[in-house]
Image: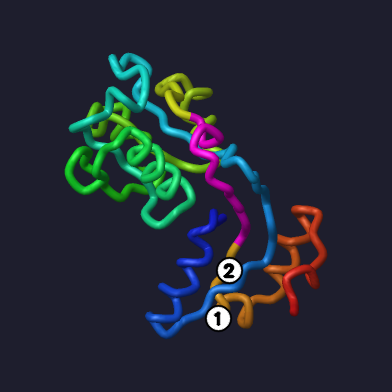
Amino acid sequence: MADFRGSLNGVAFQKAGRRSLFISVLSGSTKGSGNGIVVAVGSAVQSIADLKGKTISVPLASTSHGMLLRAIEAQGWNPQTDVNIITQAPEVAGPALQANKIEAHADFVPFAELFPWRGFARKIFDGSQAYTPTLHGALVDANYADKYPEIVVVFLRAGGRSPDCGRA
């Protein structure tokens, strides 16, 4: 799954001499729903205003990264100096949050909802508060799709999508 770092993903793949294909829209929001910032359930942090000087992890170049930057700038802060932003995927950030190695984690669906549902985090900021549009979709490595087109077709059909939906 990709959120629309998918657009940046294409650039990164291209620089590496590779290509990714956007094959399916999964969700989107004109206001930014689906992104969020969570903290450990026992954290004293109650709002983004409490995160000044703290470490916040986020998947780099994701819509949640954009949301985080907008939320920080809305506080009048400099994202380079007023917070410590580090790159972490959700599978790393969840345990880091539980171990108090980070003060907050910004992410896209399903993680901003999944972490609180699992009982170790609570949401302090919803992406819709930043009014940052989001688009989440599925990407596949082009070489993989060429080598295993039947797997891509099965993936699309399992999600109720036509295998022709991403073709131009």
Q: In this view, does 65 lie above or below 155?
A: above
Residue 5 location, x and y as percent?
Answer: 48, 59
**Dot 2: few (<14), some (14–19), or many (≥20) neighbours within 10 Å?**
some
**Range of the magenta residues?**
126-138
The outermost residue toward the bottom is: 17
Q: Which residue is drawn at 36% across and 54% down?
A: 60
Determine if the magenta segment contains residue 132: yes
In this view, the residue in front, 130 or 141, is 130
From the image, tell me which residue sits under label 1. 143
From the image, tell me which residue sits under label 2. 140
Q: Which residue is drawn at 62% across and 68% down?
A: 22
In this view, the residue in front, 74 or 161, is 74
Disc 1 residue type (three-letter) = Asn
Disc 2 residue type (three-letter) = Val
Horizontally, residue 96 falls left or right of residue 27, namely left
Which picture quadrant has residue 144? bottom right
Q: Residue at x 21, y 48 (%)?
A: 80
The Cα–Cα distance between marks 2 and 1, rounded to whole angstroms, is 9 Å
